[in-house]
Each structure stands twice: as structure tokens, then as C-alpha cells.
Amino acid sequence: MRLIQGTLDELGTPLSDVEFVVVDLETTGGAPGASGITEVGAVRVRGGQVLGEFQTLVDPGTPIPPFIALLTGITDAMVRDAPRIESVLPAFLEFARGSVLVAHNAPFDVSFLKAAARQSGHQWPGFAVVDTVHLARQIVTRDEVPNRKLSTLARLFGSPTTPDHRALTDARATVHVLHGLLERVGSLGVRSLEELATFSSRVSPAQRRKRHLAEPLPSSPGVYLFRDANGSVLYVGTSRDIRTRVRSYFTASETRTRMAEMVAIADRVDPIVCATPLEAEVRELRLIAEHKPRYNRRSRFPERQPWVKLTVEPYPRLSIVGEVRADGATYLGPFGGRRAAEQAVDALHEVFALRQCTRRMGRRGGGGACALAEMGRCAAPCTRAADAGTQHQASLDYEQIVRDVRAAMTGDCRALVSDLRARIRALSDGERFEQAALVRDRLVSVVRAAARVQRIGSLASCPEIVAARRPPQGGWEIVLVRHGRLAGTTVSPRGSDPWPYVDALRATGEVVEPPVLPAPASSPEEAEKLLRWLEADGTRLVDVQGAWSCPLHGAGFERARLDPLSAALSAGVVGFEDRLTGVAG
């Protein structure tokens, strides 16, 4: 069955109460618009009983090809005085009103009817459609029939009507095929129109038996939790319509192998209704981080995301750490994994001559120069001279390097990006493409991390932000964000004064303690989700406490330039050398 309109999800009509209109068309060819309809035949049935029939020849407005006339027996003379489709279509639509259309190879017949509706200026009602060819492929095996032609299936199901390429005759034969197919799916537990709409042989009986878990759920935005018999959370998801989304796990639309495994051991589904879709998305993140369900792949371990830290010591260095501490250090990140963090560190070391050794160094310490110092890639504070004046100057030089690194991490990254692009360009010109690609990946990692920390850190510094957006149904969705954490949401109904809702939200919202910047009071993923909502078109800022801003020459601009190229790289849209040239430019 092919579901053309999705409203069947809200129905639970027994198949015996459904009125089907089985339709068949004869045409002058196979292309809607270029070919015309020569005959329409339809039978309306309910509960196995015929309620009415519809049949008429149609003047296609063009000559009927000889081979079509030979196949159907319909000639130009027969349709010369027949009505045009512009007159026939309104009568057919009235005959089919409120029904489910059925056809053998439904995409063909429905496409011609839709094309006729467009050409004649009629609005297509958006019928739900059952395709008996598609349904037969699900439940009639090759051992029974060599093909799924209408004549073959009519013989299989004992139809008293033999198809003959005339519309009404073929529609009558299709009625018997439909009833035979419904009898078969009925033995598999399909009793309602809703179950027929989601039926597929790819759905196991065990999976189909679990569909009752979705029935008591609300058709509201929110979060749903699949639990096993012991109450352990298996999977957490979110949807604008919890009931419809959960129901899809028991149908052919769910193709993920691990989800079928999860459904097999699920015992119940717990819903959490949320005031807004944003609240649902945030709750999903928090519940995944709390329960770490084994069937969720993303967002389970936000605490494992690494940061790059510019240490606080006489001669600072870069270090990869697991958390942000209140130690006065400068942080970059967080990163999706350690490899990305290492690439960002390599990018900074590529440009700035920071020391890379891990030993502790005091102001008066000394030592021999390392290989990096001899290559000019380290300022080598360990080799400073014993003379006090020279020591002071060396210290000042290293402090300037540290200031430049700090600026690239938290503010102006133009020097960093310019230098790395120049290196990529030079390597590409020298046809050293693998090395150029390595520098490119380092550039992308450091720019993304810098843009992320600049955006998240600014949001986290704001004690409170109140924003609102109009949903499609009217009114206002009101959001309260404190230190980068969702502290509450509410909805003011259409036509009401939103200010009392804003005041109530502020008074009842979660109290959020200031975090250690630049980390937010939530997970970085939650903060980014809030940023996307706040920055989206249609969002209005009601009040902002603090300074929510990004640096003028920060990494956000560079990331906007690099991300489309990175997406093209992943998709293979551009060639290898072009990707390098695009980054270098």
C-alpha cells in the first residue's frame, strides 16, 4: 500500500467500515499530461458489499493510437461524442468523496487523475491510496504466481470477472483482488485502516504485536522513553507528535536494525509532554546523558568531550584536558573527540612557537635546546641566557606569543587562519597534497572549536536571556535561558497578553548557578541547541542580562566560510585539489 496522505495515522477505523473506491483508467499512453484518459471505471465497496459503480468514456482530445485501440477496443468513433475530462472529473470526485482510493498500479492511475485535476483547475482532495500491486508483493509469493499482473491475481483469488483492458471490468476484477489481499493480511493481525497503512512483510509479527504500546500516548510534542521489563531505559527520542512517532517504530518506515532489536525487548513507552519543541529537544539531551541508553548512539557522554587548555604557568603551553576549571586558564572547545583536539593543538603549534614540552619550568630554570627550537618552531624559553636583561626580554617575547595564541582562541583569529591558508597554498602549489590536506584538517578543527567556544562562552556569561517566537498556531513560545541552560519555557495563547507569562516564567524558572566560563551551565550540545533557536529567523529578544556578543574578527566568520566546503568534501561534490584550493583561498 502507498499512503499518499498521512492523516490516516490519527484513524483507527475497522476495515469493515472503510469505504474503498476501486478505480481503473484507460489512456492513450503512459505519460500524464502528454497522454489523455479515454475511460474511467470505478466501484465503491464497503464490508465486501458493492455500494455503487461509475463508468464513462472520455474524449481525450487527441487521436487514439492504433495499438491502444487494439488493446482496449476503444476507438476514436466511440469517444467522439463522449465528455471531456474537465466534465468527468467533478462527477468522479463526488463519487469518491470520503473514500480510500484503490488501484492496481495506483501510481499510474492517480498520476493521471492528479494531472487532469491540475489541467482543469480542480483541487485534488488528497485521497489515501492503496496499491494492490504493492500489497500483493508483500504477501503473494513467487511460488504462487509468476507475476503480479491483474489477470494473474484475479485467477489466484477466483475472481468471477476476467480483466479485459476496459475500465469498469478491470475495476470489478480489482475489487476481488483487494478482498483476497485483505483476507490474507487479516490473518496476520491487520484489522484496521491504520494497520493496513503501515503494513509491510518486512515488519516481523513480534514487532507488529508491540504497536499497542503507542495507543495510550498523547499526540503532543515531547519526549518518549522506551523501557524494558525491568524499567531500564532502552532509547530516548523526541517528536512534535509523540504518538505518531512511536507508532512508526512498529511499521516498515523504521528500517534500522538496532531499532527492531530494541522494539523486541521494549515493555512500555513513557511520554513526557513538553510545552514547546525546544523543551522537548533539550529534555531529550538531558535524559540521554542521564540514562545513557544503549540504543542511543549520540549525546550519551557529553562529559567526555575534551578541551584544549592554555595553561597558567611562567611559560604556558597547550594541554588537552577533560574539563574546564576555575584556574584562570584559556580554553578552546569542546571537541567531539581527542583526534579533533589534537588537530587543533597542531594547528596552533604550526603558527605559534609555543613550547611543547611538558616539564615544569620556573622563571629561572634553564636547559638545552630541543629539536623544535633548532627548527625554529619553539621559542625555547628553557635556553634563555643567564644575564638578567636577556632573561627579561626572552620572557617578554614569550608573553607576546602567549597573547597571540590567546587572541586566536578567544577573539581575533585572522592571523592564525591567514598563516595556515598560506601554508596550504604553498603545499598545494608544490603538489604536496597529502600534507596540505593535513594542514587543512587542522585549520577546520581549530576554527570550529574557536567559533564554538566564542559562541557558547558568550551565552554562558549571560545571567538571563528571555526570548519569544510565534508558533504556526499563533500566540508566543517564550524561552528563559540562564547561563547557557534552558531554565524554562511556556506558551502564551493566541490573543492573550504575553507579559504575565514572561513574568511568571521568570519567577518560576530554574535557578542556575554561574558556571566556570567558558563552559555553560548545561552541556555544550544543549547550549548550541539554544543558540540555534535564539539565532533563528522570527525569534525576538525580550530581555538580555549581560553581554551576548561575538568578537568582531572572531572564528564565526571563518567557520561560515569553511563549513560549506567541508560539507562538499564529505559528500564528494568537489575534487581533492579543488577542496584544498577552496580552503587556501
Image: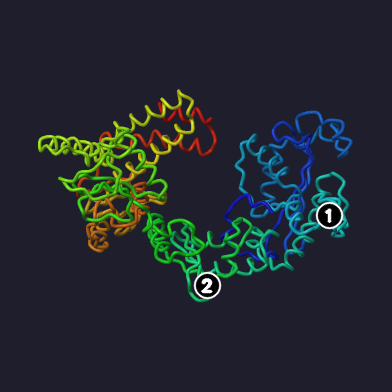
Q: In this rendering, is residue 110 above or below 430?
A: below
Residue 551 in view in this figure: no
Residue 158 in view in this figure: yes
Label 1, secondary structure: give it. helix
Q: In this rendering, is residue 17 above or below 348?
A: below
Please give the residue where the numbered disc 1 appears in the rendered image: 153
Labels 1 and 2: the sequence-earlier one: 1
Left or right: where 328 falls relative to 127: left
Q: Nearer the viewer, residue 315 or 513?
A: 315
Q: Position of residue 37 (x, y in %)?
A: 75, 37
The residue drawn where x is 25% and y is 64% is 508
Q: Residues within 10 Å of mark 1 (few under 14, many from 20)?
A: many
Q: Position of residue 439 (x, y in %)?
A: 41, 35
- Residue 52's quadrant in the figure? bottom right
Q: In this rendering, is residue 328 above or below 369?
A: below
Quadrant of image for the N terminus:
bottom right
Q: Nearer the viewer, residue 268 or 256?
A: 256
The residue drawn where x is 47% and y is 57% is 239
Q: Position of residue 572 (x, y in %)?
A: 54, 35
Q: Position of residue 233 (x, y in %)?
A: 47, 69
Q: Amino acid at mark 2?
A: Asp
Please give the residue where the numbered disc 2 appears in the rendered image: 228
In front of the other: label 1 or label 2?
A: 2
Measured in 3D between alpha carbons, the distance from the residue under mark 1 to the one under mark 2, in whole angstroms, is 43 Å
Q: Amino acid at mark 1?
A: Leu
Which residue lies most toward the bottom here?
Answer: 230
Assess whether mark 2 and mark 1 are in contact (beta carbons under 8 angstroms): no
Q: How many marks?
A: 2
- Residue 419's quadrant in the figure? top left
Q: Nearer the viewer, residue 535 or 216?
A: 535
